[in-house]
Image: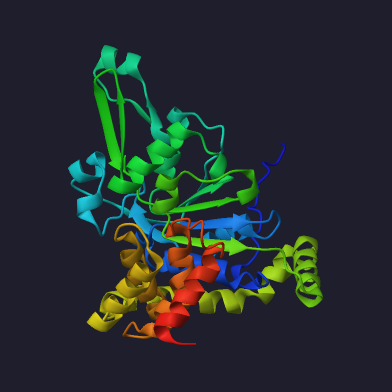
Amino acid sequence: MASRKTTTPRPVFPFDAIVGQDEMKLALLIAAVDASIGGVLVFGDRGTGKSTAVRALAALLPPMQAVAGCRFSCDPARPEGLCDACRDSTDLVVATVPVPVVDLPLGATEDRVAGALDIERALAQGEKAFEPGLLARAHRGFLYIDEVNLLEDHLVDLLLDVAASGENVVEREGISIRHPARFVLVGSGNPEEGELRPQLLDRFGLSVDVRTPTDLATRVEVIKRRDAFERDGVTFLANWAEAAATTREKILAARALLPAVAVPDVTLENAARLCMALGTDGLRGELTLIRTARALAALEGDEVVGVPHLRRIAAPALRHRLRRNPLDEAVATTRVDRAVTELFGA
């Protein structure tokens, strides 16, 4: 009798072993602490560890509690966010599941992303037969879009609607299905291949630029670690297990501290002054800046948000919200840094 083969999951490169790219790693950690920030946009060269970092962070996070058997991995601790089936159940069984990381391919159809309704079954049997899509799978996890700047317009519109409401609605022939869909949206791309639609760009909480390392020592270290991981992933993961445990505990501690972190009025005023100096549209810049600074403070164990937190996170929170000024050719990061220096000192 032939033995049944068991497939073991492929090891994921450790988050802490990623060399450099500190701003990208910090942005992802902040998004893991507070999902309400709005996700992370990573623009830069190919082969700089963008997708590696996303999958590494998800593998680093502790498992989450979910309703057993729920197609949407509903959170039993949040009754207001349950799907209809879980809300109607009188006996919810809790299970531990990994944090999902779902890839949204550029060529995906709307049915694959949002889910599909079986109209014939619904009309013939009166049942709302629904096949969940990628948005359902990504609920409470990460939705990753590589080359997000090449995403088709109808999918962009869908993502904008879901990001605004936290709920996915599928309607066909007068039949409607809705389910919770809250996730950390992570997009990556190469700016040389096209710009991102302003509506979607504004929805990302943080924007990070990554570049190929230019110094010899960093490039050599990247090659050494990647080669060691590919030659013996089990040993490599074991060598980085302690660092992973430390980072995991740091995330959990930050999540616990986050509700208690205070934001004084003077910090709110400083955030508003910075956004006014940069001419950002609307108030989303201030809100994102404050939320990001609060999550950063929680990560660092600080109970009060101050200028050091605003200074450190200003560029990723604001660089993608600046208007283009034909009289000022300075790149967005330089403009933010210059405004920070003028307001808060060198």
- Locate residue 228, reporting x and y percent: 78, 67
1, above or below 59, in the image: above
* Colour mapping: rainbow
Question: Could you tell me which residue is drawn at 24 percent across and 57 percent down?
Answer: 78
Q: Is residue 248 visible?
A: no
- Locate residue 1, reporting x and y percent: 71, 36
Q: Is residue 119 left or right of residue 78?
A: right
- Locate residue 227, reporting x and y percent: 80, 64
Question: Could you tell me which residue is drawn at 55 percent across and 45 percent down?
Answer: 195
Q: In this rendered view, identify the residue nearer to me: 94 or 20.
A: 20
- Locate residue 112, reporting x and y percent: 47, 31
Q: In this view, does 287 lie to the left or right of 49?
A: left
Q: How many labels does the image show?
A: 0
Q: In this view, does 237 lie to the left or right of 282?
A: right
Q: In this rendered view, identify the residue nearer to me: 78 or 235.
A: 78
Q: Is residue 53 visible?
A: yes
Q: In this rendered view, identify the residue nearer to me: 82 or 280.
A: 280
Question: Could you tell me which residue is drawn at 46 percent across and 56 percent down?
Answer: 99
131, above or below 165, in the image: above
Instruction: Specify the quadrant of the image occupied by residue 162.
Output: top left
Instruction: Specify the quadrant of the image occupied by residue 56.
Output: bottom right
268, above or below 134, in the image: below
Instruction: Specify the quadrant of the image occupied by residue 134.
Output: top left
Question: Could you tell me which residue is drawn at 26 percent across and 43 percent down?
Answer: 83
Q: In this view, does 169 lie to the left or right of 62?
A: left
Q: In this rendered view, identify the residue nearer to me: 38 or 62.
A: 38
